[in-house]
Amino acid sequence: MKKKKNPSQSGGEIESVFVRQGLSVGAVWLIYEIARRLGIAKALGPTRQGKLALWQVIARVQGSRLSAVRLAGSHAACDVLGLGKFNEDDLYDNLDWLCDKQAAVEAGLFAGRPGKPGLFLYDVTSSYLEGTENELSAFGYNRDGKKGKRQIVIGLLCDELGVPLSVEVFEGNTQDTRTFASQIRKAAERFGAKEVTFVGDRGMIKSEQVEDLGAHGFHYITAITKPQIETLLDGGVIQLGLFDQGLAEVTGVDKVRYVLRRNPARAEEVRKPREDKLTSLRKELDKRQNYLKEHPRAKVETALKKLQEKCNRLRLSKWVSICAEATEITLSIDNEALKEDAKGVANPRVILDGCYVLKSDLSPEAATKETIHDRYKDIASVESAFRNSKTAHLELRPIYVALAMRTKGHVFVVMMAYLIIQELAARWQRLNVTVEEGIQELSSLCANEVSFNGKVICNQIPQPRESVEKLLEAADVQMPEALPNKGVIVTTKKKLKSRRNLS
């Protein structure tokens, strides 16, 4: 708090200037500037609803643990965005508006891109719900590991760099392939794409989807399932030996190309559980053998039966044999049977250790086998987007809204917030700071509320300290010298839950 006094003509003194700490401004201003740079602010528009939507995005980037309304009470949201008062009901209604305008906003974001993608990455995930009232909720394949929870399915369409272009919400029991047709329509109609390639995860692009892509002049890269690999092996289209040749390629019927590889890391993942099971069986054998030595009247047949039962439970009996001679129990391994088991030939249900096959209709002139392989690996960027959106500090889940439109609006807010997170992560990488840490540091930069003769005239921005200055410079954002003070005080309608007595 700071007061300055000037002498009056009569010799007295009047209070002229009063300065006190105002609202937090650093994080809000930086995120707002990044949102403008990415075209988010322009795509949402200058209306009140557009500004409310932009604040929901900014609040989501700042962390979802605090409600967007409560956050606006301590941050200069209204002064930066030019907003009037709002409460939770306004933001719920704004989610409806966002859902209704999503296609237009996504088209606006796409139109503002520096170039048009020649490749689309697509994947789906699920997100669990609290309660049972959500209009899109259903039981389905739960990727969150939340048993007994209803869920929604979310499809995310990205460009070749993993930058989100569109997000879509489906009912929780929707199969992956059933979400794909609308993505093709978006690319063709909303984004005006021509001769692009879709990259989808294993089992995403099947015969129906291939036909749909071909009808629009699009191409595809995907991975085939294990049963499909076995069919190709049985038909002689591919041979097991090709997996040991690094990156191999085979052309099938209709000029469909198959790119084969054995992933050593995946092979190790499959091999280790098998070795762990064998180690467990050997420990059990040593235990039984010691018991027989210490108890001469114990029956070898009983110990042998118990060991064979465990061998069957561990599914090792195809290549492990246990037998007894006198009082000695021995374990032997059939290496040939083990080799066949690992390849999945002796037992079709066993995964081929580290082997996978990619499938594409791209011509060799359009893409080499290395290019097909590398582009398929890019699907990992969509998976990364899901991880960061569902967990981290964006926290898409759990979802508490019940109406379908608000659920879709909520998910769209998270997608736009992720665009900003992605940009900041790239710009702050050399500073060795996470986006969450950077946002927290910027939130400490508060405006100075300057009053003159009892009337607030502006929010003066002080010189940032060095740590904040570095974050701003890395993001290529400059703070203004001052902001207008609208005098808007945002208050929440909801009370916090009463705290537990910690004494």
Image (tube, rainbow, N blue to C red):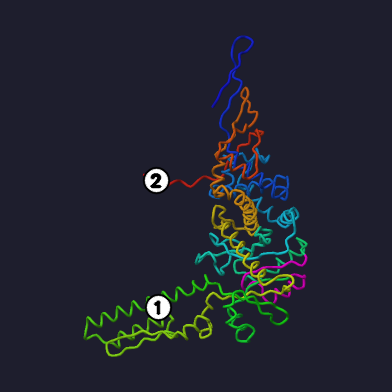
x, y percentage for residue 82?
68, 39
Give left or right: position of 303 versus 214.
left
Residue type, mark 1 in image: Leu
Check the picture and name the quadrant holding the N terminus: top right
Residue farthest bottom in this picture: 326
Quadrant in the rendering for residue 132: bottom right
* Residue where numbered disc 1 is placed: 278
Q: Earlier in the sequence, mark 2 or mark 1?
A: 1
The residues tagged by marks 2 and 1 sit, at their Cα atoms, a distance apart of 52 Å
Part of the protein shown in magenta: 194-218
Residue for point 69% across, 50% down: 38
Residue for point 39% across, 82% down: 311
Neighbours of disc 2 within 10 Å: few (<14), some (14-19), many (20+) = few
x, y percentage for residue 115?
75, 57
* Residue where numbered disc 2 is placed: 501
x, y percentage for residue 70?
56, 43
Secondary structure type for disc 1? helix
Residue farthest top in this picture: 10
